[in-house]
Amino acid sequence: MSRNPLFALVTALSLMAASLCAVAGEAEDRPWMNRALSPDVRADLALAQMTTDEKLGLVVGTSQRPTGETVGAAGYVAGVPRLGIPGLREANAELGVAVALLHDTVRPEDEATALPSGLATAASWDPAIAYANGRMIGEEARRKGFNVLLAGAVNLARDPRGGRNFEYAGEDPLLAGTMVGEAIRGIQDRHVISTVKHFAINDQETNRTLADARIDMGSLRESDLLAFELAIERGRPGAVMCSYNLLHGVHACENPTLLEKILRQDWRFPGWVMSDWGAVHSTSEAALAGLDQESGANWDPRAYFGEPLAIAVAESTVPAARLNTMAHRILRTLFASGVIDDPPAPQPLAVEADALVAQHAEEAGIVLLRNENNLLPLAADLQRIAVIGGHADIGVLSGGGSSQVVPVGGPALRIEFKEPGTTTPYAMVFDPSSPLKAIAAKAPAAQVTFADGENVDAAARAAKDADIAIVFATAWDMEGHDAEGLALPRDQDKLIAAVTAANPRSIVVLETGNPVAMPWRDQVGAVIEAWYPGQRGGEAIANVLFGAVNPSGRLPITFPASTAQLPRPDVPGRNIAWNTSFAVDYREGAAVGYKWFEQQRASPLYPFGFGLSYTQFRYSDLRVSGGATVVASVTVTNTGTRTGADVPQLYATIPDSGGGALRYLIGWTKLTLAPGESRRVAITADPRLLAHFDEAQHGWRIMAGDYRIALAASSSDPGLAATARLDDRTLPP
Ligand code: BGC
């Protein structure tokens, strides 16, 4: 800094003039860098300068880290440096920025804040939690140098054994679409592109590349596709990732019904469609059906959008205009997202602040399922606490597969194993947040013991000697595999039964990726579903156990009593011959999860939307109006003695052309009330939720009539009822 103020002023002015000249020069040389122009105009200006080879380079990616690249990633697409178009550095990011699996060595810089599972976030029923998660992920991605995140996983949980349900947001399209849309919005607000995936109906992991989904298209619009539609409207993701499976015999990544008719014509999606890794099967068919970019081409038998696409364009099998459209969609998204104007800037992570985001998500998503005689919350002056099982002395479990985050501080524990007959090693990863330590910190006067649960008798003895026994039960799920059934693995049911027999003041904390059976339920004092708890899971669980946090999570997925209750008691395609596609008959159609249970008049173990609190809530004075849509208002009162949050849910019974009439979630709100406090809340339903998708009229058809409306605490709670008269109308698709 000069000590002469006049000199300093002159220097500053000349620097400003120089940078203005640079901007003016840039505007002349690179008019697409002009932020005042629309993303589409900017994309066309850049495209006009690009050679065919450069366009071809933009539509194919690899999962091999290119020489000279320091950022570890799930995918990489070369940019056009001479025009200022950056390469795409892609990371998986549903539950935090993940880079681990595709590289041999995990480096310290690959660590990122591990969020709780997607089901945990969905269980919060709080869009602000999903948004905060997304924003945190977007910020960490920026600081690591990524500009595209493979996030926004919104496949519906049609099967409670689904290996990736933990990445998703449950079984209801409104809940899932809202929560995932908010996460995408959070990511993109940090000027990083997010996908929404896996489009569409990739709803089982067993032989996912061969599974051929069969479902009535109207029902698909009302279920899985509605979740995508809502997530896209809220989050405006830059890209859609098409999925591995087939739909009615056509692979999703070359399926014109999905990619052209629905995504482009009906939904007017302006971004680009990228394939899942290894999900491309052709060149011209895929390009002409609407696939814009082949991802991870090294996973395909050959790079379909490499040399073969160059030949197809040269021979006009794929028109040059189509290649332009593909490149345009990528470029316009790079401009629209801010990736070019405000590129990632490497910086260390804000680990403390980010860990709190993970902790809050888990605290909001833990579901209290059972609490006999108000066993919970625990008193801080307990004398003897026995903590048992689940490696609770070390950390909390996370789910496996491409979404696996290397947590900050590194994995607390990796349990490696190989499936019999296979050579690929898998690793169960525990995040470094010890529930045992967090519990001990909450009860400083107590003697807190730990038994690993391997020896059932020793665990029972420890429980008998204690005032309270807390069993941590884990079930590991991973991408590519569906669970065998609903039972907890490794004889944990036996362990829980023995501990409860020794001490009925037993609490079971579930760390699971899915619903599980609970043969011991009626004997245990309390059950909490903690899902995969994330970077600060131990602290969040302890806060709930001791009442620093009043649980407010509600199930985003039905807990069945048995697999016999499911539309497909056996997961299809488990034992098929290699390379043979097989049909998955989604005979439940749009009646996914709780709607199926209602249709079958089956009683689940715990219904969708269910969750207890340490206080109680009362609903009164429900008023509804109809006409174009349902608007409901109700008074919610905290009738207990603690502050707590409630999730009043609005359901409508929709007349069904097929005979039955099903109750659908059409809205909800989450609110916090002090003891004795009352508040009036209003919920307006998106009219599509009151409609059937009419394939013949190609629109959402609301049938005139009286609709039963219920304001309830879960999908099977009758709640308060009222009637709304709706007008006959058809909404555009
Ligand atoms: C998964 C995607 C993921 C991709 C890249 C695929 O196997 O299905 O969710 O984004 O790999 O890692």
Image: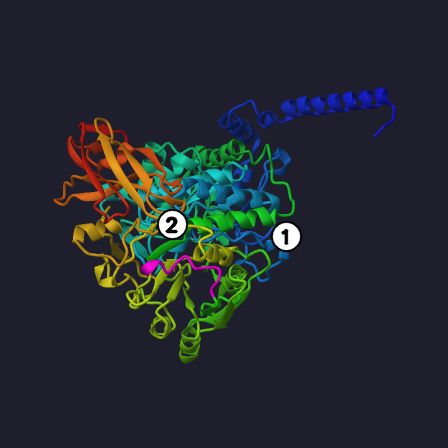
Instruction: Give the tally of numbered discs.
Output: 2
**Residue 207, how many percent across, how many down?**
35, 60
Q: Main secondary structure of the magenta part?
A: loop
Q: Which segment did they paint magenta?
A: 371-382
Say the numbered circle drawn on residue 246. Answer: none
Please name the residue shown 52% across and 52% down the image: 74
Using the image, determine if residue 412 lies above or below residue 139: below
Q: Amino acid at mark 1?
A: Thr
Image quadrant in which the C terminus is located: top left
Secondary structure at numbered mark 1? loop
Say the numbered circle drawn on residue 553. Answer: 2
Mark 2 or 1 closer to N-term?
1
Left-right relation of 333 to 634: right
Quadrant of residue 375 within the rendered picture? bottom left
Q: Amino acid at mark 2?
A: Gly
Q: Which residue is mark 1?
A: 67
Label 2 to label 1: alpha-carbon separation: 46 Å
Res 280 visible: no
Quadrant of residue 574 within the rendered picture? bottom left
**Residue 161, how many percent across, how many down?**
33, 60
**Residue 300, how many percent across, how many down?**
45, 54
Quadrant of residue 547 within the rendered picture? bottom left
Using the image, determine if residue 324 lies above or below residue 438: above
Using the image, determine if residue 718 lies above or below residue 686: below
Q: Nearer the viewer, residue 114 or 483?
A: 114
Secondary structure at numbered mark 2? loop
**Residue 360, how many percent across, how many down?**
48, 48
Q: Nearer the viewer, residue 599 or 626?
A: 626
Mark 2 nearby-residue class (10 Å; few <14, some 14–19, many ≥20):
many
Q: Is residue 378 magenta?
A: yes
Left-right relation of 81 to 425: right
